[in-house]
Image (spheres, helix red, strand yellow):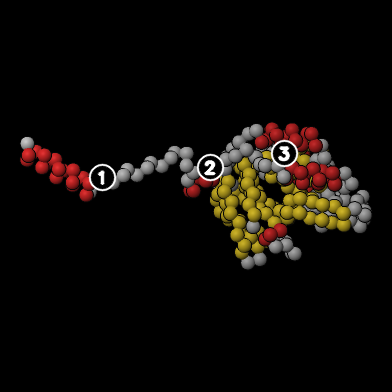
Amino acid sequence: MTRFLAAVALVLAACAADPMPPLEPSASPTQPVAERSEDVRAPGAVAELFTSEGCSSCPPADALLSELAERDGVIALSFHVDYWNDLGWRDPYSRDAFSERQRAYARTLDGRVYTPQLVVDGTEGFVGSRRMQANQAINTALSETDQVGITLTVQPEDEGLRASYTVGSAPDEAVLHLALVQRTGEQAVARGENRGRTLHHTNIVRTFDTVEATSGFRVLTLPEGLSPDDVRVVAYVQEGRVGPILGATIAPA
């Protein structure tokens, strides 16, 4: 009996001197993993306003867009068209490419080209100052989860910004739009329909690039007079150049 007790004492002493290492905790299946972040999707809405400083009906729509931009999950963009430029005032933010984008939307929506026009998620277009209709369209878009996830990082590089992107699984016909937007703008209008007014704008699209919906980067040139603090970069995936918008994100410079 004495020998048995002595043997037990030796075993207990060995266990105390060299305890079993604790088991490593297993990774939680819901814990986000960095290399898969492009697959993370959230509800979102993209509101594209086609506007002009030469249009007297546009300032209320510009103001509404500023309000929409403050809503969680909403990416609001201001595209200034150029077809008002010959009527007394040349909009300094206007580009023919933005007019062409609106004309392309007209071919898929109601066939009309006018300002102000708000297009929500690439599928619904209407007069951009209609608050109730805008909020209804935004609420519908926010009730649905994005179909395609996007990661976007932006870093200063020389005279511009390097926008690096990764797009999750997207349809073959999908494209990725990269928009460099000026956060705010103010303009005193000297001629035309808005003569004597000071106009205020939000998220003015200054450069707009369309690439394959895969992974890569683009170097975006900063417009003269702007610093990285003045701009943001928006990336959004669309089914064709003017089809339904499948996912979007925004990043500061």
Give SS at disc 3.
strand
Name the residue type under label 2.
Answer: Asp
In which quadrant is the C terminus drawn? bottom right
Q: Which dot marks residue 7?
A: none
Q: Which residue is at 79% across, 43% downward? A: 64
Q: Which dot marks residue 39?
A: 2
Q: CA distance from mark 3 to mark 2?
A: 23 Å
Q: Nearer the viewer, mark 1 or mark 2?
A: 1
Report which residue position mark 1 lands on. 20
In the depicted view, which residue is nearer to us: 210 or 38? 38
Of the numbered discs 3 and 2, the one sitting upstream in the chain is 2
Q: CA distance from mark 1 to mark 2?
A: 39 Å
Name the residue type under label 1.
Answer: Met
Q: Is residue 177 visible?
A: yes
Q: Nearer the viewer, mark 1 or mark 3?
A: 1
Return the x and y of residue 246 as percentages of the image width and height: 62, 39
Of the numbered discs 1 and 2, the one sitting upstream in the chain is 1
In which quadrant is the N terminus drawn? top left
Residue farthest along the bottom direction in this orientation? 158
Q: Which residue is at 71% across, 53% downward? A: 181
Q: CA distance from mark 1 to mark 3?
A: 61 Å
Report which residue position mark 3 lands on. 120
Name the residue type under label 3.
Answer: Val
